[in-house]
Image (cartoon, rainbow, N blue to C red):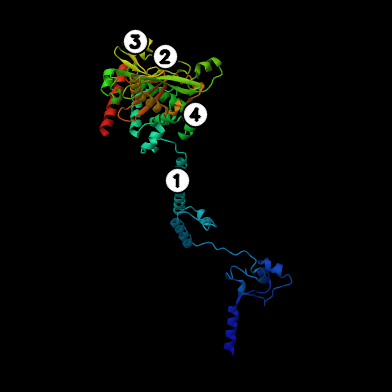
Amino acid sequence: QQVQREKMKNQTRHSSSSKVGAGESQKQFFMSCPFLLSRRKDFTPNYNSRVCGWHFPHGKAAGPTRFAWNEGKAFPHISQPTKRQKKMLLATVEDEGRPEPGPSHLGTAQKTPSSSNVLVLEIENEMLRKENDKLKKELEKQKQTFSFSQISSHPDIVNYYTGLPDAATVLFLETLLSKFDLQYHFDWNVQKMPLIDQLLLTLMKLRLNCGLVDLSVRFNCCRATVTNIFITISSALYDILYVGMMENKIPSRFKNQTSLPHCFQPFPNCRIVLDCTEVAVSNTESLDTQSHLYSHYKGGTTLKALIGVAPNGFITFASDLYGGSTSDKAITADCGVLQQLEAGDMVMADKGFTIRDILPAGVSLNIPTFLVNGQFTMEEINHNRLIASARVHVERSIQRLKTFHILSYIPYQYKKLTDFTITAVIKAHSRLIVIVLGPKVNRLSVKSAQTHEVNGRFISQMCKSYFHSCQRKS
């Protein structure tokens, strides 16, 4: 029995978590737990008072923390991760590349920076930098300007925008321009846009007559830059292709005979075929100016120019622009084409060119026969038919000029800028046409101290070598 009583006493001691002494020690224990006293004010501990071990989940030293009245009401306790758990979390973040947002369990680890934290931040920074670069590239693609490189591999698109057959011809013109120092019209240089794109802008204005706003949006520049480029490049092309190669250089009749078409065999001495073309222009406030510009043939205000074509279809002369009311004879007498003719030359023209009395001595005129007796004779019919079959060349050349829509309509406020010579350089064995519109001002300064005559020979030699290479390819 004594042994059984000892066993029961030991079991009772293990089942209870704490034994509180009487007297002053009892009061000190319960005073250290004010929540117990606040809950049981009518309770006075004594020698036999006991506290169940259920109230001590963390041991006797931590004191009682579990009570029936706070079960399910207090916030759940979140234990801090151990050092091993922290390392595992950091390794998981490094594998994923970027930490996911949410409740961070690394708050205590961030208070003590380590190499792992720095590595995570560097990885995140690198990923954000790559994403930023990707977005910048996408934005640049959306803002990408129109350039020659986008169309250079498509000959049909090059021909549509420039009027030239392929990219090689455009690059050839760019090579000619690069031989000179361009002096820009507004006295400030265009540096951000490549020369090839400046040439493309000019050719698009000549070919399609695009508006300034349209070109400024396409090439991502202001309208003043578009105007500066267009006037400068067109003037430079005028100086290179016309002044350097064609001015006062109408091919002689002996040179024409080397490439005389079959329809010109009855006219071996023909040196040039003349005709006029008109360009529509807007009305002005001045009635005198409107009267000078009004054309009875077109029924509106126009600007008029004289075009001279060689028998092989090559445009060899283009005059300044005159008012639409100016007669063909007056333009022919004033433009200077007659001063280039020699004795033995023949000029072919339309009926409107009654210029026989102003031709130089020894120069003949071949125009269709006028109807005098009410009916043409058979000889006159055959003569007119031969002239018509030959004159069709100049009409087709003028028609090719009109494919450049800058000649479709000119606002009168740009009249000062349109005091230009319309010229064309045509490759005889193909349909190559280069239209040049330029004011009569020198926009080029040659890099070396060469004379204008030497420059003309240099450019002419380059053009001849290029045309010969094209002929060999064809």
Viewer-side label of 2, 4: 2
How far apart in space, not on screen, are marks 1 and 2 (Cα)?
A: 67 Å
Earlier in the chain: of badge 2 and badge 3, it is 2
The numbered dot on residue 329 is 2
Position of residue 78 relative to residue 407, above or below, is below
How far apart in space, not on screen, are marks 2 and 4 (Cα)?
A: 40 Å
How far apart in space, not on screen, are marks 3 and 4 (Cα)?
A: 48 Å
Position of residue 443 relative to residue 191, above or below, is above
Residue with the mark numbered 4: 223
Residue type at mark 3 is Pro
Residue 191, percent from left and from top: 42, 29
Q: Callout 2 environment at 10 Å: few (<14), some (14 to 19), or many (20+)?
A: some
The numbered dot on residue 360 is 3
Earlier in the chain: of badge 1 and badge 4, it is 1
Viewer-side label of 1, 3: 3
Residue with the mark numbered 1: 134
Q: Callout 4 environment at 10 Å: few (<14), some (14 to 19), or many (20+)?
A: some
Viewer-side label of 3, 4: 3
Looking at the image, which residue is at 47% across and 45% down?
135
How far apart in space, not on screen, are marks 1 and 3 (Cα)?
A: 73 Å
Residue type at mark 4 is Arg
Position of residue 433 relative to residue 110, above or below, is above
